[in-house]
Image (spheres, rainbow, N blue to C red):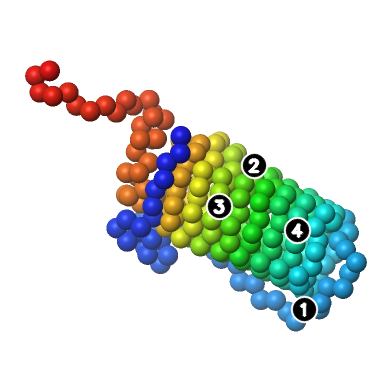
Amino acid sequence: MARKATGRAGGTAGAARTGSGGTGVKRARRPEVRLPPLEPYGGAGLEPDGDYDGLEFREEDLAGQDGAGARFMDCALRGCALDETRLHHARVLDSVLTGIRGVGTDLAESTLRDVELVDARLGGVQLHGSVLERVVVRGGKIDYLNLRKARLKDVVFEDCVLVEPDFGGARLERVEFVDCALKGVDFSAAVLTDVDLRAAAQLEIARGVDRLAGAVISPGQLLDLAPVLAAEMGIRVVPASPSGV
């Protein structure tokens, strides 16, 4: 059962931006990516276990290529196509990915550390079993994001749309959702610590509402989620009978 909630009630979105608002929730540490002067990428294609350092990939068509186990360090990927690109076990470090697009990109069991992902248009991206640390996902839209059994620490989702993201069995620590839409999110078996949902523009939980311990939500979101929380606890909510009946 899915429920929607907003992060706007009572000015809580502003509180979420500027501080803990008295809740004691720990804030996510954002990445500070400072790229060096970059060399244009001039390769013939990605290679398994490839080593890419200080390169700019601009408008490259990387669809269907195999870069499993590759390392991207101090790189920028701008406007690249990643349809069915295989990046299993890849490491993306101190890098910026802007305007990337693709369906079925395989980043399973990869590591993203100190990464900015901006204005992405992705569908069915596989990040299950991956590690994300100090990552900002800003703008864009990602459909069917698979983060099952992933570990997220110091991650911010900002001004983006996530359609049916799957956090099943994942561990989230110091994760913030700011002005973003969460549609049909799955938190089944997830473990949440200092997860701030107050500033989410839309919060629609399809599964795993019982895993919200360790998260902070706004009073308005609590009211919106009350029916599904009651159902989860087995509480029947029925209108009161007229007096004397």
Q: Quadrant of residue 43?
A: bottom right
Residue 57 in view (yes/no): yes
Mark 1 closeness class: few <14, some 14–19, many ≥20 residues within 10 Å: some
Mark 4 closeness class: few <14, some 14–19, many ≥20 residues within 10 Å: many
Give the mark, 2 or 3, whose residue is nearer the N terminus.
2
Residue 211 in view (yes/no): no
Q: CA distance from mark 4 to mark 2?
A: 23 Å
Residue for badge 1: 38
Q: CA distance from mark 3 to mark 1?
A: 31 Å
In-image side of 38 versus 213 (left or right): right
Give the mark, 4 or 2, whose residue is nearer the N terminus.
4
Looking at the rendered structure, the number of numbered marks drawn on it comes to: 4
Residue for badge 2: 149
Q: Residue at x 56, y 64 (%)?
A: 139
What kind of residue is marked 3? Leu
Mark 2 closeness class: few <14, some 14–19, many ≥20 residues within 10 Å: many
Looking at the rendered image, the disc whose residue lies closer to the viewer, 3 or 1, is 3
Looking at the rendered image, the disc whose residue lies closer to the viewer, 2 or 3, is 3
Q: CA distance from mark 4 to mark 3?
A: 18 Å
Q: Secondary structure at mark 3?
A: strand
Disc sitting over residue 162 in the figure: 3
Q: CA distance from mark 2 to mark 3?
A: 18 Å
Q: Nearer the viewer, residue 82 or 68?
A: 82
What kind of residue is marked 1? Leu
Q: Residue at x 61, y 65 (%)?
A: 119
